[in-house]
Amino acid sequence: MPTAIMSLLIAFITLSVPIAVAIVIASAIGLYFFSNLPLIIIPQRMFIGLDSFPLMAVPLFILAGNIMGQGGVSKRLVTFAKSLVGNIQGGLAISCVITSMIFAAVSGSSVATTYAVGAILLPAMIMHGYPKPMATAIQASSANLGIVIPPSVPLIMYGVSTNTSIGKLFLAAIGPGLLMGLALIIMVMLWCVFTGHGKNDATDRQGLLSSSKDALLALLMPTMILGGIYGGVFTPTEASAIAVIYGLILGLFVYKEITFKDIPKILKGSVISTSSVMLIIAAASLLSFLVSRSDLPQLLSAFATDNFATKLQFFFAVNLLLLVIGMFVETSASILLLAPILAPIAVIYGIDPIHFGVVMVVNLAIGMFTPPLGVTLFAASQVAGIQVEKVILATLVPLATLLCCLVVITIFPSITLFWVNS
């Protein structure tokens, strides 16, 4: 049965059938023709897959990201980042990376970060003389930090699907997220020095003191959310609700950039985004149940142990697999389909499941940026008004930078486990 389902799933994805629909149809055909289980299993397992308290954080973080994007938070974070580093060559591009890191720490979404930050900084970088392809590549690569730096929706998915502590996953992702952000900043600085771009970035730069005052409440948001989670004040799910409330207060009463009339539109956009994610989660839960009842996990485990002698060999084989899959399959679906299968095999090799989860998310984050089908690459290109084909060459330098980070994170688990074990 698993072979038939996987073959059908690959065929449907090749035909561009939506991933959730492809999973349900492939699973239904497999159930009907290749098993004795009743079809009532389909709605039952899909409902069970959604019946999880930690999953409540997903729609709330999506809503919080939309509120912040339209409520003035992203704009103030951009102004603060520009005032912080805008006086040096390449400061505008560096501020793009820094703003994406901060915004990622509350939105948990790469695509949301691309639209919220890119809508402000991409036109500014182009106006200051940055080549449009490189400006787009910088924005797309830094936006991917959104699913690495906590709170991260994919990390929540991994925690739910493998019964791993979400709080520990958030802690473990801090080091890799900071490493990737720092690497991108260094890359941008070197690129600007060698190409001569970014010399006039100080134009229209606001003073650090005034921008800090204006962005103080926005900057408190990630501190409050992450500090509350790690301090044991509230759970990640409760933190997502607090993020929504805090974002509404800022947008409605402090910055006054949204009104009560805007809330239905924000809710509608959030419901649409949430529905697509939740449908994938439900469908993946059904497929995971069917796979777990077969001998596929055992076969894959035997294949891995027979072909990869060390954990590094296994890790790099998994990295290659995930990078390719991340280019074609939506991140949440990739995690929900593969994590329950790969995580137990990683444990056999002595790999900490928390470290493996972070590496898995980093892989898929890079896959979202990798040409030709990276979703954040398409989003940034849309914001910049440029064809994706014209951006591909410019992505090579930031892509190489992120791949170097992936190698370091893979080889040195202390980068992920330092805060968890301390």
Image (cartoon, rainbow, N blue to C red):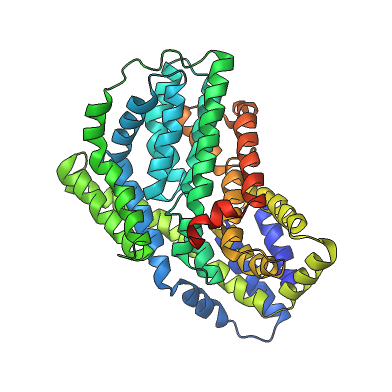
Q: Is residue 15 visible?
A: no
Compared to 45, does 268 lie above or below? above
How far from the left and from the top, in percent, is residue 125? Answer: 44, 22
How far from the left and from the top, in percent, is residue 138? Answer: 52, 30
Q: Residue at x 59, y 32 (%)?
A: 398
Residue furthest out toward the right: 306
Q: Quadrant of the N terminus?
A: bottom right
Q: Residue at x 26, y 36 (%)?
A: 215
Compared to 286, does 360 lie above or below? above
Q: Residue at x 56, y 51 (%)?
A: 415
Residue 78, picture quadrant = top left
Q: Is residue 101 visible?
A: yes
Camera-side residue of 367 and 216? 216
How far from the left and from the top, in percent, is residue 190? Answer: 56, 22
Compared to 364, does 237 lie above or below? below
How far from the left and from the top, in percent, is residue 212? Answer: 26, 33
Camera-side residue of 175 and 50? 175
Camera-side residue of 84 and 1? 84
Compared to 278, does 395 lie above or below? above
